[in-house]
Image (spheres, rainbow, N blue to C red):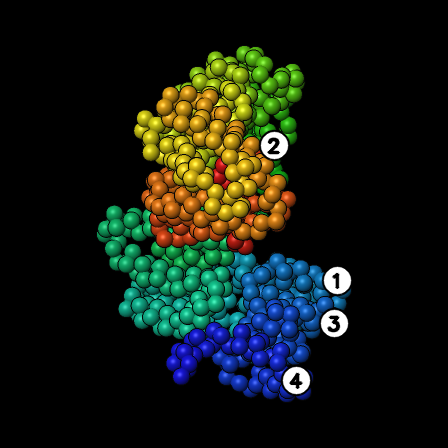
Amino acid sequence: MSLVDVHQPLAKELFNAAFISCWGELYDQYQEDLVRSIDFAITSAPSELVHRLLNLAEFMEHEEKALPIENRTLGEYAMKYHAYAKALHYKELEFFTETSPTIIEALISINSKLQQHDAAWGTLLIAREQYDVSKHEEWYERLGRWQEALDTYDKKAFEDPDSLDVAIGRMKCLHALGEWDQLAIQVEENWANASHEDRREIAPMAAAAAWSLNDWDSMDEYIATMKPDSADRPFYRAILAVHQNQFPKAMAQIAKARDLLDPELTSLVGESYGRSYNTMVRAQMLSELEEIIAYKQHADQPERQAATRKTWMKRLQGCQPDVEVWQRILQVRALVLSPEDDPVMWIKFANLCRESDRMFLAEKTINSLLTPERLQQQFHGGNQYAKAPPMVVYAHLKYMWACGSREETLNYLLGNSQLDELSRLLARCHYKQGEWQFALKEEWSTRNIKDILHSYYLATYYDTAWYKAWHTWALANFEVVGYLESQHSIKTGDVPGDELAAHIVQAVEGFFRSISLRNENTLQDTLRLLTLWFKYGSHDDVSHAMTHGFADVEVDTWLEVIPQIIARIQTPSANIRRDINNLLTSVGKEHPQALVYPVTVASKSSSAVRKGAALEIMNRMKVHSGAIVEEALLGMIAFLEPLHEILEAGPKTARETSFTQVFGRDLHEAREACRRFNIYGEKRDLEKAWEIYYGVFKKIEKQLPQMTTLDLQYVSPELLKARNLHLAVPGTYQSGKPVITIASFATKLAVISSKQRPRQLSLKGSDGRDYQYLLKGHEDLRQDERVMQLFSLVNNLLAVDTACFKRRLHIQRFPVTP
């Protein structure tokens, strides 16, 4: 009995490989018979078998031995059995072979199901421009393009005002856009003439509108019309029961809604997190309804209610920054919290609407925070902000600026003296004032520098712990330095004038402060700080600012920019050289593993100044991390000594004899230099040994192009024997986490047949994992390091952009270790 007979999972795993091994041995006639059988089996087999046959077809295509089954057939059954990724592949093949509106609609549908909305939207544009694809509005709905769908429905409503299908389509769009007033009007116009089935479709949207408008009587009528097995019905009944303080009834309806939601959530979670997200939000709303019941029941415990509100705020900030998601959650909370009771949440929602270009909803949300009296006042008729909460004023001013009323908005800030009541909010107002002052001018000039910088300075003054203010103030000074440079043609190394030096110092102080306030993603500020330091650090004021700033930030700040700092250790400026030496000494004391590799490389430089600076740092590191430094700097002597012993013992093969004749004298001289270094400690002896070894290496290198693998037992048996070193696995060191050290090295290195012939090295870490590396022994890695830092900055930008975050866009980075 074979292993696959007793272990079915193994048989299933080996099925594809077994099939292809037999496929090539079959005569054409038998292959045709087998394909016909597979073709028939796909049409009628159980779901599990269909998926296995689809996997087989994919495997055979990948191995360039595709089964002669029509793409249309494979795509049809992949779609039928929810294998959407495979269905997309086959439909795309169909598209390139024969394009038709039907195939395009299928592509849109499949991409929508896979949450690939960009691809679906692009396909829809093709369909709209090149083919007569009907019902554009339905595809707009599926892609979440509600405004485009509403515009299309409006055109159809103008052509056919009595169409109920068009009216229902408009209702769906208005429901998604949160246009509750218009939705309520549309429902009222069509409810009386709608059939029972149409009313069932309209009822959930009508109930949502009635709920938002506090029309509880109408809501009860709409709920009664909903489908009995719909999760919406118990959900809205629970909402109504909570409003009426019928808590046992509400809890029963919540449990019923959860039971109806469970199958849908279970199936979607198994497919993907993105596709299940909206259903998870509905489940969260049910949980929050339970919390709202508890909130109402603890009306006599304000501390407990405050803790609940704090939890709600934290939870909301953890949700996806999506208008529809936030709107649904806030609507549930409105059962106990009016916008004026919790303005912070609603202001954040208004800002999200504004940033998502949902301007009508943003305005409506801000207006909900104003009293009716203030809503009646407009700029032309009076000051609607006379008694409005400052936070609301600030949110509305940002809304007005986004709508284009820029001069008017800025004039309000410049002329208002009543904002001093809240220092933190005043800081944000001054920040926006500076931002808008610059936006109207669009570039720096001698006339606007003072006003703009003063606005940013006041933002830091009124909120000393606000990262954004310090960052922007520092960045503005940084840009002013660049502007003044361009005006006066100051060269690198020139001593700046007093005006320029003042801006440089302010930028340095600002960047240090912003870095200290933000423990992560500080690379952009750190790089700009290095630019100022290396360019103007020779000026005494700048040097003093740098020295004071080093004490204000964590040593960890410099770990990401060690390559840039090491590159400047031979700078001619005594001030910069001294500061670099002190900083690297501090870094080496806290994080020797992060510094030992690059400093060791620098200590072998041909530049005497660079080499001396690196050796000075290494000597300081020896005091507290002697074992690590010895392994990195002097380890090569210990590793080479056994090889010298073998060489001195005499050759045993013809190849060894040839090697001894060619390189024996040079290697003997290098060994003597190493011995003198060990006895007297003269650095020139070690440098001489390095030069000899390197010369031998260059000669050997000419003989290497034919080698495709290197066996470590021949090229470095001591490295092969090395076990449990103190050195960290390159690229794994992280501050505050356990150090993963090198446990052992793999036995072979593969040589890649490219210009520089890099080696593939594998080593095992103390955590048991294997780590793969590409050894690029003949290249300057500084450009690679800068590219990885650029990728890190790009990832930071992608992470804070809502659209990019939803698409999970990021660039994969790799550690670069010199």
Residue at the outermost left position:
300
Mark 4 and mark 2 lie on one chain; the one further toward the N terminus is 4
**Separation of residues labelled 1 and 3 (CA atoms):** 17 Å
In the figure, is residue 263 to the left or right of 99? Answer: left
**Separation of residues labelled 2 and 3 (CA atoms):** 51 Å
Helix, strand or loop at label 1? It is helix
Q: Nearer the viewer, residue 111 or 628?
A: 628
Instruction: Provide residue 163's location: percent of width, then percent of height.
Output: 65, 72
Instruction: Provide residue 116's location: percent of width, then percent of height.
Output: 58, 61
Tell me the residue at 37%/70% (across/down): 258
Helix, strand or loop at label 4? It is loop
Q: Amino acid at mark 3?
A: Glu
Q: Amino acid at mark 2?
A: Ala
Q: Which mark is residue 129?
A: 1
Q: Which mark is residue 439?
A: 2
Q: Nearer the viewer, residue 211 or 816?
A: 816
In the figure, is residue 764 to the left or right of 155? Answer: left
Tell me the residue at 62%/78% (across/down): 24
Q: Which residue is mark 3?
A: 98
Instruction: Provide residue 373's location: percent of width, then percent of height.
Output: 47, 43
Q: Amino acid at mark 1?
A: Glu
Helix, strand or loop at label 3? It is loop
Tell me the residue at 60%/43% (across/down): 703
Mark 2 and mark 3 lie on one chain; the one further toward the N terminus is 3
Q: Given contact means CB atoms under 8 Å apart, are the residues at marks 2 and 3 in contact?
A: no
Q: Which mark is residue 27?
A: 4
Q: Amino acid at mark 4?
A: Tyr
